[in-house]
């Protein structure tokens, strides 16, 4: 087994090889609600636009995965528009009907939970940003918990860093934290991508508006629905980052949420 792959992750992920010399990746995750059904999602995908699952040991939360080489992340692509076109093509393939009796949690149920927890967590953390933003996220989560859209398999943590270059296909998705829900949930997650660069940009509002317009067009989804999921998710994740002591990441996520507030405050259309 080789040295674990670098990068921010709470899982153990390292290169390995099978007895016949086949290059693989061993991934061992903490047993939690986000990772417990990753193998079920990968079986459903069966390598179609995603990394292929080779074996799984649920008792140990261990997966044996296809090794993607050269393995460059899509986040390394300088042209963000082109990267989002590639990401959108893959995401449309990822979204697929769910089998009867599936075990994936519902995004709508998560939204209902977050609607109840956002403001109390904001208060418990000493009001680390403006109260209006926490309140807006809570209202949005309440509205988003009621969806008329058909449920599909969702990735939950889809961003350019979770798309790697490969030989079987030019690009493949990794690391799903599967949910069942509406497509706009995953599109909203893409809005908070590349947030280091976004935080440093002098024209961040313009970049976000362009990103939102492009994703709505490429994915044929309602622009406001994507925006609402993106804002609410960024606030919830920002609060989680503050809670675990990652203040810089919390600030970046809340900055992303601010860019998604109504036009009167940021220049981004609602």
Image (cartoon, grey):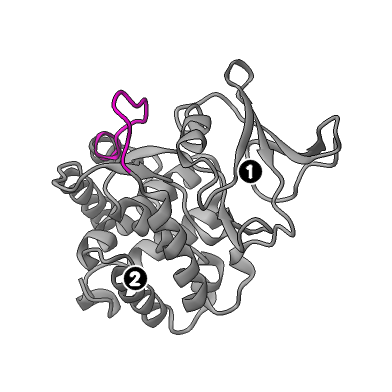
- Residue at image position (64%, 36%) is 11
Prevailing SS of the magenta stretch: loop
- Horizontal side of 178 relative to 42 (left or right) equals left
Label 2 sits on a secondary structure element that is: helix
User: Up-down: is 6 above or below 43?
Assistant: below
Pointers 2 and 1 in contact (C-beta within 8 Å): no
- Horizontal side of 126 relative to 49 (left or right) equals left
Closer-to-camera residue (171/208): 171
Image: magenta residue range = 97-111
Q: Quadrant of the N terminus?
A: top right
Q: Determine crowd level at label 2: few under 14, some 14-19, many 20+ residues with C-alpha closer than 10 A.
A: some
Earlier along the polypeptide chain: callout 2 or callout 1? 1
- Residue at image position (51%, 37%) is 42
User: Up-down: is 20 above or below 143?
Assistant: above
The magenta stretch spans residue 211: no
- Residue 123: where, in percent of width, then height? 32, 41
- Residue 22: where, in percent of width, then height? 80, 39
Q: Determine crowd level at label 1: few under 14, some 14-19, many 20+ residues with C-alpha closer than 10 A.
A: few
Label 1 sits on a secondary structure element that is: loop
- Residue 244: where, in percent of width, then height? 53, 40
Closer-to-camera residue (99/133): 99
- Residue at image position (45%, 71%) is 85
| Picture disc at residue 218 | 2
Q: Quadrant of residue 161?
A: bottom right
Q: Is residue 129 visible?
A: no
Task: Give the mark toward the camera: 2 or 1.
Answer: 2
- Residue 252: where, in percent of width, then height? 48, 61
Q: CA distance from mark 2 to mark 1?
A: 29 Å
Question: Dot 1 corresponds to which residue?
Answer: 9
Q: Quadrant of the C terminus?
A: bottom left
């Amino acid at each position: 087994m080789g040295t674990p792959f670098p990068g921010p992750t709470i899982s153990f992920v390292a290169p390995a090889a099978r007895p016949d010399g086949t290059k693989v990746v061993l991934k061992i995750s903490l047993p939690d609600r986000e990772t417990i059904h990753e193998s079920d999602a990968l079986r459903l995908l069966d390598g179609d636009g995603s990394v292929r699952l080779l074996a799984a040991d649920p008792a140990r939360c261990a997966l044996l995965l296809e090794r993607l080489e050269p393995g460059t992340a899509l986040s390394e692509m300088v042209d963000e528009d082109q990267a989002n076109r590639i990401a959108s093509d893959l995401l449309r393939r990822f979204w697929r009907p769910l089998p009867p009796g599936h075990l994936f949690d519902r995004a709508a149920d998560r939204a209902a939970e977050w609607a109840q927890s956002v403001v109390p967590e904001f208060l418990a953390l000493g009001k680390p940003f403006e109260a209006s933003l926490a309140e807006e996220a809570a209202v949005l989560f309440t509205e988003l918990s009621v969806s008329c859209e058909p449920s599909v398999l969702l990735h939950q943590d889809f961003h350019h860093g979770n798309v790697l270059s490969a030989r079987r296909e030019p690009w493949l998705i990794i690391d799903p934290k599967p949910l069942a829900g509406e497509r706009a949930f995953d599109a909203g997650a893409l809005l908070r991508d590349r947030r280091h660069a976004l935080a440093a940009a002098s024209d961040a509002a313009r970049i976000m508006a362009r990103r939102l317009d492009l994703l709505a067009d490429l994915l044929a989804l309602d622009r406001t629905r994507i925006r609402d999921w993106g804002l609410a998710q960024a606030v919830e994740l920002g609060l989680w980052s503050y809670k675990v002591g990652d203040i810089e990441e919390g600030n970046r996520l809340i900055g992303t949420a601010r860019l998604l507030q109504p036009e009167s405050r940021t220049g981004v259309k609602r």
